[in-house]
Image (cartoon, coloured by chain):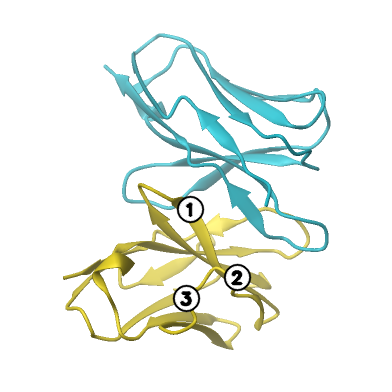
């Protein structure tokens, strides 16, 4: 049963600290998406990769957020420095790259105090 | 930016009742997807509708794509507590990209 995995599931940190979230996409999927979900804004797209290349990160605050895919089995989202307004659930999703189907991981719930 | 408006925002019903939730836009979409998200989990794809007027059924769930491909509805017959969750609709953001734009969802609670 192929699934997207994300670590950690929960993270509590203090303002100013670096946060790194990791995602393992489904094997064979060549598109990877990072989303942020809040009650107010819903699901917002932060970054989009195709074949490990970043194609769109216009939804991401550039001064503090960065997203990378070091290899096909790992995508990372970093926040440095973190701020209380970054508190949200962050989801990674992967897709086959031949359709709009996206498969989501369980998310990382981030709390910045 | 193509926006998807979902209504109602919240819905609480008794087990056994029927319900319909809506996803509307002023833009035409080539397809629309419906996802269900349970508490503490990521969204799970339920269905993709592609053709205007298309109706798809998934057990007690009936999905319809509007004739003009600007709206969609999800009808649940005889709701069960297991149907509780956040129902999200999503559509492509533009040609040549596999990015989706999501509505804010309808939060459904089915009370036993």
Same chain, marks 3 and 1?
yes
Q: Colour of chain A?
A: yellow
Evaluate if marks 2 and 1 touch, with contact meaning CB atoms under 8 Å apart.
no
User: Dot 2, crowdedness within 10 Å: few (<14), some or many (≥20)?
Assistant: many
Does A113 appear above or below B54? below
The mark that comes first in sequence, 2 or 3, is 2
Residue A56, x across and y down, in percent:
65, 73
The alpha-carbon separation of the residues under discs 2 and 1 comes to 15 Å
The alpha-carbon separation of the residues under discs 2 and 3 comes to 18 Å
A71 relative position to A11: left or right: right
Disc 2 sits on a residue from what chain? A
Seen at 49% across and 74% down, the residue is: A24
Reading the image, the residue beneath label 2 is A32
State which chain is coloured cyan. B
Reading the image, the residue beneath label 3 is A61
Name, please, the residue furthest toward the top.
Answer: B17
The mark that comes first in sequence, 2 or 1, is 2
């Amino acid at each position: 049963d192929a699934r997207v995995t994300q670590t950690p599931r929960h993270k509590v940190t203090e303002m100013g600290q670096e946060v790194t979230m990791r995602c393992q996409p489904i094997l064979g999927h060549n598109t990877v998406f990072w989303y942020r979900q809040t009650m107010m804004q819903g699901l917002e797209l932060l970054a989009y990769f195709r074949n490990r290349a970043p194609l769109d990160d216009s939804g991401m605050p550039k001064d503090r957020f960065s997203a990378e895919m070091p290899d096909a089995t790992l995508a990372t989202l970093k926040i440095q420095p973190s701020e209380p307004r970054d508190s949200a659930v962050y989801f990674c999703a992967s897709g086959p790259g031949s359709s709009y189907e996206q498969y989501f991981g369980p998310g990382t719930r981030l709390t910045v105090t | 930016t193509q926006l998807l408006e979902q209504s109602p925002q919240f819905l609480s019903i008794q087990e056994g009742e029927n319900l319909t939730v809506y996803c509307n836009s002023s833009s035409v979409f080539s397809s629309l997807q419906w996802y269900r998200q349970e508490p503490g989990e990521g969204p799970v794809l339920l269905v993709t509708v592609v053709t205007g007027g298309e109706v798809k059924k998934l057990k007690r769930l009936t999905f319809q794509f509007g004739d003009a491909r600007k709206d969609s509805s999800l009808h649940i017959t005889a709701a069960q507590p297991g149907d509780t969750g956040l129902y999200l609709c999503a559509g492509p953001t533009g040609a040549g990209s596999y990015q989706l734009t999501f509505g804010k969802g309808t939060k459904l609670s089915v009370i036993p």
